[in-house]
Amino acid sequence: MEKKPISKQGFDNLIKELKDLNEVQRPEILRVVQWARSLGDLSENADYSAAREKQRQIDKRIQYIENIINNASVVDVDNLSGDRVLFGARVVCEDECRILSDVESDGKQVISCTSPVGRALIGRCVGDTCLVRLPSGEKEYEILEVKFKD
């Protein structure tokens, strides 16, 4: 499977969340499931059903994060420089945005490197323009500045 880029900060945040899920949230929900099971009839036990659903959500999130971590290519964006748009760059067009991974993207200030805009900007230099097809129509972006340091 292809390794996907993620910033060191994004990777560290996922490790921290995984640790919390495994060491705090999952043990707590297992205690709740065990308590609810001790109440008796499971077919009409809302506490048990809710706890099992929460356990499924936690387990699914753990699996998702582990998959990202196992297929991650960590990029230390603090060591990057230049005038070409790369993963981790802050790009100033009309607005300023940063290009990071899918899991770090918010769609506004941080855009995904796999989004139409992210793919169009990567590899371009200051002064370049690119035309991007968006669901709302085509939009032209002119790269005014590329920054790597905050």
Image (tube, rainbow, N blue to C red):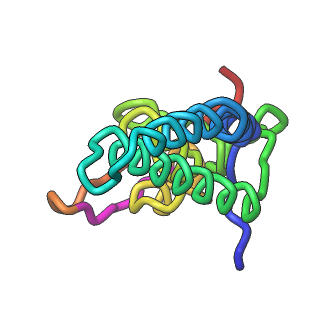
Tell me where residue 41 appears, x and y as whole percent: 33, 51
Judged from this view, the residue extending furthest toward the left is 136
Q: Which residue appears at 48% of the width and 38% of the height? A: 110
Tell me where residue 133 appears, x and y as whole percent: 28, 65
Which of 13 and 116 lies nearest the eye of the viewer?
13
| Position above or below: 137 against 14 | below
Tell me where residue 23 appears, x and y as whole percent: 72, 34
Q: Could one spot residue 143 in this view of the protein?
A: no
Q: Which residue appears at 27% of the width and 42% of the height? A: 46
What is the chief secondary structure element of the magenta stretch?
strand
Which of 4 and 96 lies nearest the eye of the viewer?
4
Q: Quadrant of residue 2?
A: bottom right
Image position of 59 (left or right of 43): right
Q: Which residue appears at 39% of the width and 62% of the height? A: 116
Tell me where residue 93 appears, x and y as whole percent: 41, 37
Which of 99 and 9 lies nearest the eye of the viewer?
9
Judged from this view, the residue extending furthest toward the right is 79
Image position of 35 (left or right of 4): left
Residue range in magenta is 128-134
Q: Quadrant of residue 90?
A: top right
Quadrant where the C terminus sits is: top right
| Position above or below: 58 against 60 | above
Quadrant where the N terminus sits is: bottom right
